DNA sequence: TTGAAAGCGCTACCAA
DNA sequence: TTGGTAGCGCTTTCAA
């Protein structure tokens, strides 16, 4: 292993000078700098980040906390965060909390112990107190917050949008899939849809799903058709749920979108691979990830003092689980 | 921030003693140990992993290199690794190489610089030389290797199995989706299928997909039906590809499985949500992840000296993109 | 059974 | 413009 001392010795200078050259701060004579650069190349020296981190109490590591890596929405988010961070020379420790507060807390501990420079959290289970008194900034992603900077999509508008498109396309007996009650984002879109449905005096039923996992989605889908067989439109809480509904409908010989319209939420990559391809409310997951990363970096650079919340717009992606309408207004 | 010195001072002992108590090595009087434990609790002291890592040149961090976090197969793998590692008190740095050798190398660098204890790599793009001369053990996952320990599923058998089931169910004009040529695992299953097809003297065509991404899968699907419209059976290189084929077939009004049978590969969670649910060759992704983690831990504990390769079995999951057969033999 | 002290590789202060 | 050195928090000799 090559250390800064090896470089110093070989270049015939002190470690202090090498360090200055390395970090581009403090005076270093042009010639000395060149010599040092050359030596570093020859030795293919790479500074030890652990030693740096010990001294500075900051690493080039960012913690990313995800609620469930198996839900395709989150890898998308992660990619956005990763790409932006990469450009700023930060690396990610991804913690998969698995919707389990214990795991989540243990990851926060890991982040602390490894001197991460900042954390982005997309989890929702944990009490806020675990995020207090941290020595690094935290940005919440896919989650609103009054006390912390956050990046999220406009759930209320998304819910309204889904309801409106459903109504415009003629569904009368609508069923709403309600996501986990503890999930603020899920409840926002749910409320948005209800608002709109009420405005239009449309009847609706509600099915609550316990979680956003594949298994719960399937269960809810089967139940829905038992409980509310007259349903002619489903507004799902996410695309996984919508996929399960679509699956169940086709299995029961219900034609989509003729007899039953379905609108999903998220627009995960698989949605267009379904058949018929899923109409859905698109959340810009990748962009949300990138924005969260940008926000964190601004925080680190001290460019922002207050708690900034960034709300990104959602939009309706018309595919084929909804019927066509002539007029676009 | 509480340090070991704070604990020592408060307990009225030296840092050396606290350290010994902490690590359970060397002599510490029972009473002293109790006192120290109590003090640690009172101060809720947590050792600084960075300082430890600097001295020992080893952290509690494991690097996990993934080729594409958006392909649902890999999060599944990751979960297996994560769960096993968690139980042994290791944490994961997940690097998403994005099928890009540059990124991959940069992550390997990050792993080195952060003193990871070991690395599990599920990537395939990079020349082996980047994995040589590393100061920590590397286990390959979803990839065979002669020179490194590895965990993978039996691709040859999987390919054969897919072909056999296809033949038994009466498809005569089969088209094989061939995954990326540089991917050994993809080629194994491909070869397995061809072997079997040849044994049975069945004709087949081949479509090569450039990558395992959603976009390439869609492109290949569209092309397949243009080039080989007479196809009555598709053996896909993975479930994403199979989903794209299924989608395209239904779009063209081809009935599945009556006119066209499809067999996927992987058994990712979404496969059963498709309609009709996808028949596929299941790779035990989660278990593969766990096995790789176990293998790495054994390596770290010095329990294994040689290069051990673990091959896991695959199996046919009969769902509804294949026709029923009476006899099971 | 305990403690003093060296040192892991680096940065930053201060003096030269 | 450069170098000596203290110190980041920890572990591990070695001596007491």
Image (cartoon, coloured by chain):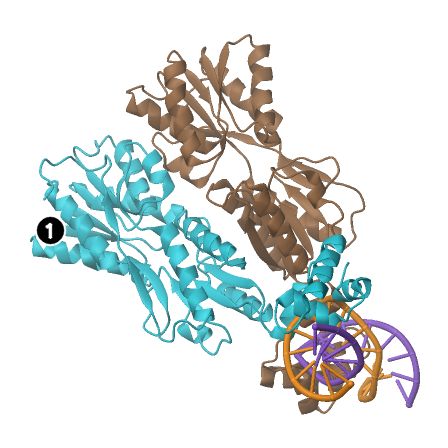
Chain colours: A brown, B cyan, C purple, D orange
Q: Say which quadrant the C terminus of chain B sits in.
A: top left
**What is the quadrant of residue A221 in the picture?**
top left
**What is the quadrant of residue A319 in the picture?**
top left
Residue occupying image coordinates x 9% and y 35%: B326
**Figure disc tally:** 1
Q: Secondary structure at mark 1?
A: loop
Q: Viewed as shown, does residue B221 lie left or right of B34?
A: left
Tell me residue C3's x, y (percent).
78, 76
Q: Viewed as shown, does residue A148 lie left or right of A183?
A: right
Q: Nearer the viewer, residue A69 or A277?
A: A69
Q: According to the image, label 1 marks what residue?
A: B203
Q: Viewed as shown, does residue B149 lie left or right of B117?
A: left
Tell me residue A305's x, y (percent).
81, 46
Mark 1 crowd level (few <14, some 14–19, many ≥20, 10 Å Cα) = few
Residue occupying image coordinates x 40% and y 55%: B289
Q: Say which quadrant the N terminus of chain B sits in.
A: bottom right
């Amino acid at each position: 292993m090559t250390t800064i001392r090896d470089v110093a010795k070989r270049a015939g200078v002190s470690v202090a000078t090498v360090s200055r050259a390395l970090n581009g701060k403090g005076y270093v004579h042009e010639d000395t700098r060149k010599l040092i650069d050359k030596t570093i190349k020859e030795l293919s020296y790479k500074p030890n980040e652990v030693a740096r981190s010990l001294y500075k109490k900051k690493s080039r590591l960012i913690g990313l906390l995800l609620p469930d890596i198996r839900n395709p929405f989150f890898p998308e988010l992660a990619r956005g965060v990763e790409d932006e961070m990469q450009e700023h020379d930060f690396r990610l420790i991804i913690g998969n909390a698995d919707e389990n507060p214990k795991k989540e807390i243990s990851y926060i501990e890991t982040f602390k112990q490894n001197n991460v420079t900042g954390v982005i959290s997309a989890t929702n289970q944990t009490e806020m107190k675990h995020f207090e008194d941290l020595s690094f900034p935290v940005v919440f992603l896919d989650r609103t917050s009054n006390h912390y900077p956050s990046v999220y999509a406009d759930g209320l508008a998304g819910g309204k949008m889904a309801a409106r498109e459903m109504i415009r396309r003629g569904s009368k007996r609508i069923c709403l899939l309600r996501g986990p009650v503890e999930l603020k984002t899920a409840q926002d879109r749910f409320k948005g849809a209800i608002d709109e449905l009420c405005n239009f005096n449309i009847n609706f039923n509600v099915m609550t799903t316990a979680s956003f996992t594949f298994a719960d989605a399937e269960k809810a889908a089967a139940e829905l058709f038992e409980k509310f067989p007259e349903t002619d439109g489903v507004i799902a809480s996410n695309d996984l749920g919508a996929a399960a509904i679509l699956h169940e409908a086709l299995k029961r010989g219900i034609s989509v979108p003729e007899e039953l319209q379905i609108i999903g939420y998220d627009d995960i990559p698989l949605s267009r691979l379904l058949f018929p391809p899923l109409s859905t409310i698109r959340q810009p997951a990748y962009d949300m990830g990138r924005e969260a990363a940008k926000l964190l970096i601004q925080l680190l650079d001290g460019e922002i003092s207050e708690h900034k919340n960034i709300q990104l717009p959602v939009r309706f992606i018309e595919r084929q689980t909804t019927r066509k309408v002539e007029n676009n207004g």
